[in-house]
Each structure stands twice: as structure tokens, then as C-alpha cells.
Image: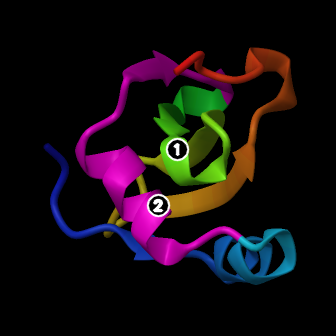
Amino acid sequence: MMPEIELSGHARAMLQERGILEEWLWRTVETPDRVESGSEGNLHFIKAIPEYGGRFLRVVVNPRAKPPRVVTVFFDRRLGRQKP
């Protein structure tokens, strides 16, 4: 996995504004359901969060930053929910 990852100011603000627990962010990065390559070389870590109704959390990381940095984090409405 990647070395130490830091949170951008924007990512910290989005956690607070969107009511996303930091624990969910780290769980998503450490044990994603899947990882996608995004635009500009970013990595998108995606994981269903049972405590949030099975909605999929998307954590966007810039792996080229030193250290790698979480750019933003959000529940991806396009992906719907994981069925129990």
C-alpha cells in the first residue's frame, strides 16, 4: 500500500461538512472494495460503509504528492447502495 497519507484542507472540510467519519476514510483507503484510476493520475478508493446504509464512500488520493494526499472524500450517489 501507499506510504503515509495526509489529508488536504479541502478533504478535512468535506469530512466535517458531509458528516463523514475519519475512521471510514482510513478504512476505505486501507481495505477498499475497489480502486479506480481517475483523471490527472488520481486514485479513487471505493468502499461500502454498512454504518451509512451501505452507501459507497469514494476517497480521491493524489499519489504523486509528497507525501500522498487525500484530495476529497464523498458518498458517491452514482454507485447507489450495497445490498445487505
Quarter occupied by residue 82: top right
**SS for dot 2:** helix
Nearer the N terminus, badge 1 or badge 2?
2
Residue 8 shown left or right of residue 76 in the figure: left
Instruction: Indicate whether 83 appears above or below 31.
Output: above
Residue in front for this viewpoint, 78 or 52: 52
65, above or below 31, in the image: below
Proximity of marks 1 and 2: CB atoms separated by less than 8 Å: yes
Label for residue 24? 2
Highlighted magenta segment, given as a residue range: 20-39
At horizontal 59% and vertical 16% (from top left) the residue drawn is 83
In which quadrant of the rendered image does the N terminus lie? top left
Residue 1, numbered label: none
Magenta stretch: includes residue 38: yes
The 10 Å Cα crowd at callout 1, few under 14, some 14 to 19, many 20 or more, is: some
At x 68% / y 57%, what residue is drawn?
72
Colour approach in the figure: rainbow
**Residue nearer the viewer, 25 or 55:** 55
Secondary structure of the residue carrying tag 1 is strand
- What residue appears at the point 47 percent right and 34 percent down from the top-left corner? 47
Disc 1 marks a residue whose amino acid type is Ile
Residue 34, percent across and down? Answer: 39, 20
Does residue 74 lie above or below 68 as drawn? above
Q: Which mark is residue 49?
A: 1
Of the residues tagged 1 and 2, which is closer to the observer? 1
Q: Position of residue 81 (x, y in %)?
A: 69, 23
Question: Which residue type does callout 2 highlight?
Answer: Trp
Q: Is residue 14 left or right of residue 45?
A: right
Residue drawn at point x = 85 percent, y = 29 percent: 77
Q: Is residue 44 above or below residue 1?
A: above
Label 1, label 2: how far apart the Cα atoms are: 7 Å
- Depth order, front residue of 47/29: 47
